[in-house]
Image (tube, rainbow, N blue to C red):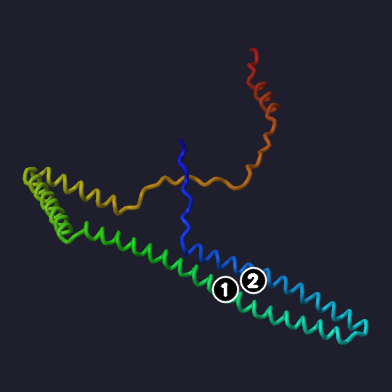
């Protein structure tokens, strides 16, 4: 059976933000509708004026002016809604950050409880005891060695110190040539060899 992934929990804050965004979208739709009316009233006023009916053209322009006032009111309402949505979303982010800081403080407190002064002092005491034990073993071994053995140990120590201060020896290999090799023409030496061969032929006596 596969594990079913649980759906994210929707909080009251999420619902409030969603409602505000829906209202914002409705206002934007209403603004688009008003803009269509403004364009239509403008064309109506132009047509009446072209026909010589000035009074009806004025009425169409007055209706257009009224719709413009409604559009300005919706602009203010839309701005307030967007600011409210942004404020709520930022507050939710702050709550999330504060929750993370609270959890971090709890972890720090737990670490401090585990690293109490007594535990630190105990650890330092155990470390000091280990150092003293190591020094005691070293002195004991040093007393049991002969003078020659101790001198050999000191000499080996000096050699290690010299090796640690000297740079690492590396074999320097020749660099790879960057140019193409030039072919050397080999002359035919066959006639010379034939002449030498003839000179070595014994003459009968």
Q: Residue at x 56, y 68 (%)?
A: 20
Depth check: give the residue in front, 198 or 4: 4
What residue is disc 1 on?
81
Q: Residue at x 46, y 48 (%)?
A: 6
| Left or right: 180, with 49 as reference point | left
Q: Percent from the top left, x then y, of residue 151?
A: 13, 47
Res 27 quadrant in image: bottom right
Determine the secondary structure under disc 1.
helix
What residue is disc 2 on?
27
Q: Residue at x 57, y 46 (%)?
A: 177
| Left or right: 30, with 132 as reference point | right
* Mark 2 vs 1: CB contact within 8 A: yes
Instruction: Decide: few, some or many residues near mark 2? Use Cα within 10 Å; few <14, some 14-19, many ≥20.
Output: some
Separation (CA) of disc 2 from disc 1: 10 Å
Q: Residue at x 93, y 85 (%)?
A: 52
Res 148 quadrant in image: top left
Q: Does 37 sit above or below residue 198?
A: below
Depth check: give the residue in front, 52 or 156: 52
């Amino acid at each position: 059976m596969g594990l079913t992934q649980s759906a994210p929990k929707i909080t009251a804050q999420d619902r409030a933000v969603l409602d505000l965004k829906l209202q914002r979208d409705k206002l934007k739709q209403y603004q688009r509708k008003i803009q269509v009316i403004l364009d239509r009233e403008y064309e109506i006023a132009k047509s009446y004026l072209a026909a010589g009916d000035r009074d009806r053209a004025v009425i169409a322009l007055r209706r257009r002016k009224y719709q413009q006032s409604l559009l300005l009111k919706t602009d203010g309402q839309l701005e307030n809604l967007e600011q409210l949505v942004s404020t709520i979303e930022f507050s939710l982010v702050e709550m999330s950050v504060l929750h993370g800081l609270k959890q971090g403080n709890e972890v720090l407190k737990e670490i401090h409880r585990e690293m109490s002064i007594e535990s630190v002092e105990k650890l330092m005491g155990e470390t000091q005891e280990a150092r003293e034990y190591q020094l005691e073993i070293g002195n004991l071994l040093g007393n049991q060695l002969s003078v020659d053995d101790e001198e050999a140990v000191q000499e080996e120590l000096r050699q290690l110190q010299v090796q640690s201060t000297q740079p690492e020896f590396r074999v320097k290999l020749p660099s790879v040539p960057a140019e193409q090799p030039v072919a050397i023409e080999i002359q035919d030496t066959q006639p010379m060899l034939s002449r030498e061969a003839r000179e070595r032929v014994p003459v009968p006596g």
